[in-house]
Image (tube, rainbow, N blue to C red):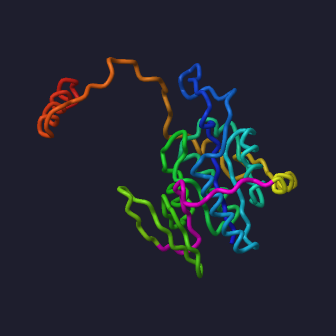
């Protein structure tokens, strides 16, 4: 089996975030980055498949500047076979669709049987890239999976739904799956793995290398401004019975001109 695992590099959980001067995003010049938490579980799932079948090839992909190579090397140290970094000036302000098009281009070129990625990114929480990639490459997909069983060219997964319910879905490979946090126990890179990772291939590609252009991935969505909400007088607690609280709430909404 050939597996593609998509890794996004996001600000470290303990990083102190400050807004960029133009207010379009955070200041990322002097902060630490790490692999998106959801993506760690996708990588672990791929490595478990490889543990059962050593003939499996695990390719990790990250879209971003040269700092993402650190995360890719970490993934190689954990047991992935190859890594690809895609970066181009045209990706500097990429939206979810642009990222999905780039991933799809790599998946098609590499001929993957399975694409794994996290349910969402810790920094944006959109959760739409996976389904977009699946649509672009024509793969059936399931999102938010908490378990997966592979057998006979099919995969049976459990999806986490609202309220703690689970849904069982069976897909025919090739397929795309997005993973929920906690679906497995993520391993650490061993010292031996880290040393071996230095010899494993890590290819840096441009948009042109994967058959795309800046025009082809021109963003449809643009972040105009990020800002901290103004400090007000704080929260107001509505008291009384359920009916009284409901009436007070409706009154407040009307008072603010929202209804």
**Image quadrant assignment for residue 69:** top right
Q: Is residue 185 above or below residue 1?
A: above
Residue drawn at x 16%, y 37% is: 246
Is 7 a magenta residue? Answer: no
Magenta span dominant secondary structure: loop
Residue drawn at x 40%, y 19% is: 230
How many labels, in total? 0
Is 176 a magenta residue? Answer: yes
Q: Is residue 168 above or below residue 82?
A: below
Answer left or right for 233 relative to 134: left
**Image quadrant assignment for residue 1:** bottom right
Answer left or right for 166 relative to 33: left
Q: Is residue 86 above or below residue 224?
A: below
Question: Which residues, given as a range, are shown in magenta?
Answer: 170-190
Answer left or right for 223 relative to 257: right
Residue drawn at x 12%, y 39% is: 243
Name the spot of residue 240 as percent of width and height, x first: 15, 33
Answer left or right for 38 relative to 34: left
Front one among 217 and 23: 23
Name the spot of residue 171 as percent of width and height, x first: 51, 73
Q: Residue furthest front?
A: 240
Name the spot of residue 136 as percent of width and height, x first: 54, 59
Front one among 172 and 70: 70
Front one among 100 and 229: 229
Q: Which quadrant holds the C terminus? A: top left
């Amino acid at each position: 089996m050939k597996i593609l695992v998509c890794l996004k590099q996001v600000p470290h959980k303990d990083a102190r975030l400050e807004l960029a001067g133009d207010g379009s995003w955070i200041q990322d010049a002097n902060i630490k980055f790490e692999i998106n938490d959801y993506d760690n579980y996708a990588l672990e799932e791929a490595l478990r498949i490889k543990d059962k079948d050593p003939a499996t090839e695990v390719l990790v992909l990250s879209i971003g500047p040269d700092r993402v190579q650190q995360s890719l090397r970490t993934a190689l140290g954990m047991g992935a076979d190859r890594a690809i970094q895609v970066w181009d000036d045209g990706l500097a302000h990429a939206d979810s669709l642009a990222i999905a098009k780039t991933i799809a281009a790599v998946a098609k070129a590499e001929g993957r049987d399975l694409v794994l990625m996290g349910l969402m990114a810790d920094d944006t929480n959109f959760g739409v890239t996976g389904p977009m990639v699946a649509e672009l490459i024509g793969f059936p997909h399931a999102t938010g999976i908490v378990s997966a069983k592979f057998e006979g060219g099919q995969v049976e997964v459990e999806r986490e739904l609202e309220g703690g319910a689970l849904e069982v879905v069976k897909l025919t490979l090739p397929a795309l799956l997005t993973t929920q946090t906690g679906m497995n126990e993520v391993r650490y890179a061993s010292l031996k793995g880290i040393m071996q990772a230095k010899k494993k291939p890590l290819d840096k590609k441009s948009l042109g290398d994967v058959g795309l252009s800046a025009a082809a991935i021109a963003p449809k969505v643009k972040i105009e401004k990020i800002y901290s909400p103004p400090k007000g007088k704080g929260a107001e607690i509505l008291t009384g019975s359920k009916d009284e609280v409901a009436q007070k709430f409706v009154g407040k909404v009307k008072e603010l001109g929202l209804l």
